[in-house]
Amino acid sequence: MAKKVLVFAEARDNELRNVSFEAIGAGKEIAAGGEVIAVVVGENVGSLTDPLFHYGADRVIKVEDEKLKNYTSDGYGQAFIQIVDSVDPDAILMPHTSIGKDLAPRLASKLDAGLVSDAIGIELEGEDVVFTRPIYSGKAFEKKKIKEGIILATIRPNNIAPLELDESRSGEVFEESIKIKDLRTIVKEVVRKSTSGVDLSEAKVIVAGGRGVKSEEGFEPLQELADLLGAAVGASRGACDADYCDYSLQIGQTGKVVTPDLYIACGISGAIQHLAGMSNSKVIVAINKDPEASIFSVADYGIVGDLFEVVPLLTQEFKKV
Ligand code: FAD
C-alpha cells in the first residue's frame, strides 16, 4: 500500500545536509508510490526548498520562526508535533545526526511511536518496512520493523543512496503556520570547531591520524592530502588525548561513527574502540610502520611504512591525477 512519508530535511548554516537527500531517497522506497513530504525548519529557509524537489520530494513544507533559528529539542519538538498532526504521515524519517538523534526519541515518546535508530538499509516485505541497523559497534546487523502506528526511523549518513539529482523537478511549497510557545532553552550562539570545511560525519573521504602523527604539526601533511581530495580530517582518541587535535575530530566508540567511501588511517593502531567508528567504511587504506598493527585486519589496502614519507608521496601522486 502506498504510504505518506514525512522527511526532516536538516540544514546547517543555511545549507541542506546531504543526508537529507538520502533520507528523501529512503522515503521514496518506503512510500512505494505514495507521497514524500520534506519538511525544512528554521528562521529563513525559503532558499532551501528547490533542492528537495530535485532529489525527489513530492511536496515541501517550510516552517519559519525566529525561535527555530537554532536547534533546541523544545522548539523543534513543538514544531514537529504540529506538523505531524496536520500531515498525518505513515512514516517519519530523520537524519541520524546529533539533531536527529535528539529529536527522534522525543517525537517517538510524544507520538507513542516505535523508533528504529541508525538505519543503514530499507526493504519492503509486503506491507512491512524492514530496516537494517548495525549492533555491537558494527560487528553484526539486525533487521527491525515497527508493527503498529507511525514508523519512525533515523538514517545513518552515507549509507542509503539519494535519488539522482533532477533539476527539472519542482513542486509546491507549503508554509505551515505553527505556534511555538516560549522556549525553556534559548541558544544564543553556535560556535563550531572544524579544521576543514568538510563535515566529518558526511564526508565521502576521510584522512585520519593517530598517535603515530606525533604532534599537532604532524597533522599538516594529512590536512594537505585531505584538502587535495576534498576530504575531512579525523583522528583516533589517542591523537586527541595527546592534544594533537580537537576532540571534535575523534572517530570511534566514544567519538563519531563514519562510513565514508574511502578512509585513510595514518599512524592508527586499530584498537577495537576506533574500529567501532570506521570499520564499515567502504574502502580502508591503512598506513602504519608496524606490520602487525590490528588496523591491517580491517584494511582493504595496507601500506607498511612511515606516514611522514607515505602521505606526502600519496599527495604528490594525487596531484598528478
Ligand atoms: P596507538 O595505539 O598508540 O597507535 C599508534 C600507531 O601509530 C601504532 O600502531 C604505531 O605503529 C603507529 N605509528 C607510529 N609512528 C608511525 C609513523 N611514523 N608512521 C606510521 N605509523 C606509525 N579510541 C578511538 O580511536 N576512538 C574512540 O572512540 C575510543 N573510545 C574509547 C572508549 C573507551 C571506553 C576506551 C577504554 C578506549 C577508547 N579509545 C578510543 C582508545 C583506544 O582504546 C586506543 O587507545 C586508541 O584508539 C589508540 O589510538 P592510536 O591508534 O592513535 O594510538
Image (cartoon, rainbow, N blue to C red):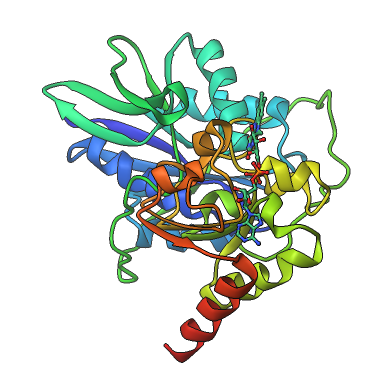
Using residue 56 as the reference point, say whether residue 70 is left or right of it: right
Q: Is residue 66 visible?
A: no
Q: Give residue 244's quadrant in the image.
A: bottom right
- Name which residue lies at 59% across and 70% down: 226
- Name which residue lies at 32% across and 39% down: 27
Q: Position of residue 136 (x, y in %)?
A: 44, 21
| 85 w.r.t. 194: above or below | above
| 72 w.r.t. 63: above or below | above
- Name which residue lies at 30% across and 67% down: 166
- The count of marks equals 0
Q: Nearer the viewer, residue 191 or 300?
A: 300
Q: Which residue is at the far left?
A: 126
Quarter holding the C terminus is bottom left
Image quarter for ligand 1: top right
Q: Give residue 33's quadrant in the image.
A: top left
Q: Nearer the viewer, residue 267 or 305?
A: 305
Q: Is residue 250 visible?
A: yes
Quarter holding the N terminus is top left
Using residue 192 as the reference point, say whether residue 200 is left or right of it: left
Using residue 236 as the reference point, say whether residue 159 is left or right of it: left
Q: Nearer the viewer, residue 205 or 293?
A: 293
Q: Which residue is at the far right?
A: 188
Q: Position of residue 63 (x, y in %)?
A: 59, 43
Q: Position of residue 120 (x, y in %)?
A: 36, 36
Q: Position of residue 270 (x, y in %)?
A: 54, 42
| 145 w.r.t. 245: above or below | above
Q: Which residue is at the far bottom?
A: 320
